Amino acid sequence: MNKSITQAPQNDKQISKSIKRFFTRFHISSALKAANAYKRKGTPVTEIFQYMFLLIFSNRSMYMSLLTGKNTPNFAKDTVYRFMKMVQINWMSFTTILASRIINNAILPLDSEDRANVLIIDDSMFERNRSKNVELLAKVYDHAKHKYRFGFRMLTLGWPDGSTFLPVNSILLSTENKKNRINEAAEVDKRTVGYRRRKLSMEKGTHAMLALLETAKKAAIPAKYVLFDSWFSSPSTLRAVKRMDFDVIGMVKKSPKMFFRYDGEDMSLISIYNKNKKRRGKSKYLLSVMVDVVKDGDIIPHLIAYSFFISSRLNSVEGRLVITHS
């Protein structure tokens, strides 16, 4: 019993030292300042942020920290609450800058130079079933459980190297359908980042995805490809991502409303599948053809073709679209 009691303060000290080394190595103070997180007077932002890190890694809440008197900060709890409510802080920019520094300074030097770097984007359910007063709380359809839940869709952009997955940035998506929103956004200054973040959360997921990619590109995240599933694979999205100088690897929707240019004709996925001769045996891919993606008569420039793979699974046709430079 005495051993566990004396061991707790030692662990807290070790965690605090590790956090300080992390803050120093990756220049957290300058990343916060670049994200517009600073104060003109009072407790420095870095000190508040370091205290929040300590709470997370010591598995302790601020309430219990103040109640037990362990790791008590030199500032009041209202200081932390005011810091978290600052609408001028660009948290998306901060996490992206931090991810860029970790990738370029700590991970990339350990990887092979021949490795192709990628960005992966996907959404998952963020449930808040017991919440009532959360801003922009919405009734969202959970595709995994096939039922509606209260919460958000959490859209996350990540960078993997084969053994490590590092989140770059993310956003909680509400819904553009006002009928499905339980609560509306709070009134904030339209000139602030907080207002733009709330507005973006009510737009389509494809628009939010482009915002995440644009932020990653500005922060010089090393990546050549963007990977996503069929939910994002529309011609307009493919064109927008390609204009950011990213190549795309993604599943293709089996939709009669989506067309690809094949042999000079605009055809759906099923039509292309039926027109071509399939491979025999147990081949992983039934066929491979070259197609173009056209949107409003506009072909993505500086490209000759798209590699288009079609496979059959459970009597359904799926496609994987690989967009590469000529």
Image: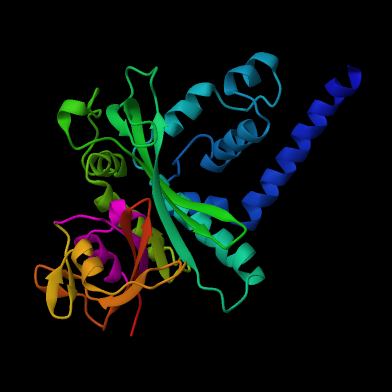
Outermost residue, right side: 2
Q: Which of 315 and 67 is in front in this view?
A: 315
**Residue at image x 18%, y 66%?**
271
Q: In which quarter of the image is residue 16?
A: top right
> What count of labels does the image hold?
0
Quarter that holds the N terminus: top right
Viewed as shown, does residue 289 lie left or right of 55?
A: left
**Residue at image x 66%, y 69%?**
110
Q: Quadrant of residue 2?
A: top right
Q: In which quarter of the image is residue 82?
A: top left
Q: Is residue 33 visible?
A: no
Q: Nearer the viewer, residue 293 or 254?
A: 254
Residue 272, placed above or below residue 96: below
In the rendered structure, which segment of residues is drawn in magenta? 229-256
Outermost residue, top side: 67
Question: Where residue 285 sits in the image (x, y, percent)?
Answer: 41, 68
* Residue 180 among those drawn in magenta: no
